Amino acid sequence: MRGVPLAVPLLIAAAVAACEQTAPPSEAPHEQAAAALSTAMVVTPVIASVVWPPSTSLDRDALAALPRAAAHAAQASQVPVLVPPRRDLLAAPVIVARDHWTSFWARTESLTVSVTMTRLSRKYPSIPSIRGAHAVRGAPAFITANEGIWSASWIENGVSYALDIECASPEAPACASDALVRELASELVYVGGVGVKLTGNNP
């Protein structure tokens, strides 16, 4: 009877030791798989070659309507800048130009409009290219709606463009369909970028 109390702790200790020895191998495959997935997801960005529109297509009226800071940012852009020519959207927009992308943002009492332009892309070998089911400005495009925000995205001038519109009121008839985002996309005009300067045609 005296040997029984000693045997129980020994059995428990052996079971704990066995668990400690077998636990790491069961976790290792998960860690290795996560590391492999993380490595696979790292894709080097591709910088697209920009095709600059002819200087004759520059909309000087829209450029002149921009505030000085916005016009300066548009001229410094590394990608062709497309903006909506409506005067209420050109009255006080924000244009930000960076090394590989430029953004336009404007708001009126009824509408918020943004245009993102980038020459950066990431291509994953395991994901095939998908052609947009819609057409915008003569190019295949994707048109989507998410929480009341309509978006259109397409390739133009070798650059990826994305136009987003949001109505101040979710019930506004203007945002009940994709008609407005299509209309604004078709209206976008070219107001500049460094390509204008490179061709020796400063506005």
Image: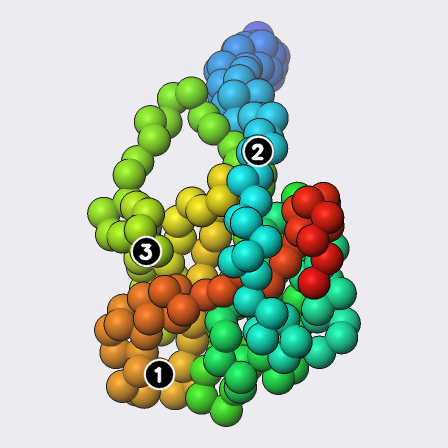
Identify whether 91 is placed above or below 159: below
Asked whether, in this view, residue 185 is left or right of residue 198, the answer is left
Q: Residue at x 58, y 10 (%)?
A: 21
Residue 201 visible within the image = yes
Q: Residue at x 31, y 78 (%)?
A: 175
Kindly report which numbered mark, 3 or 1, lies closer to the viewer in this rendering: 3
Q: Nearer the viewer, residue 29 or 86?
A: 86
Asked whether, in this view, residue 164 is left or right of residue 175, the answer is right
Q: Residue at x 53, y 36 (%)?
A: 121
Q: CA distance from mark 3 to mark 2?
A: 21 Å
Disc on res. 38: none
The residue indicated by pointer 2 is: 49
The residue indicated by pointer 1 is: 170
Q: Amino acid at mark 1?
A: Pro
Q: Amino acid at mark 3?
A: Val
Asked whether, in this view, residue 93 is left or right of residue 34, the answer is right
Q: Position of residue 87 (x, y in %)?
A: 53, 84
Do the residues under discs 3 and 1 have CB atoms within 8 angstroms?
A: no
Q: CA distance from mark 2 to mark 1?
A: 39 Å
User: Total number of numbered labels?
Assistant: 3
Q: Given the current orientation, which residue lies at the most extreme bottom position?
A: 109
At mark 2, the secondary structure is loop
The quarter of the rendered structure image containing the C terminus is bottom right
The residue indicated by pointer 3 is: 136
Kindly report which numbered mark, 2 or 1, lies closer to the viewer in this rendering: 2
Instruction: Determine the image quadrant of residue 66.
Output: bottom right
Q: Position of residue 168 (x, y in %)?
A: 44, 86
Count residues near mark 2 (Cα–Cα under 10 Å), then give few for <14, some for 14-19, many for 20+.
few
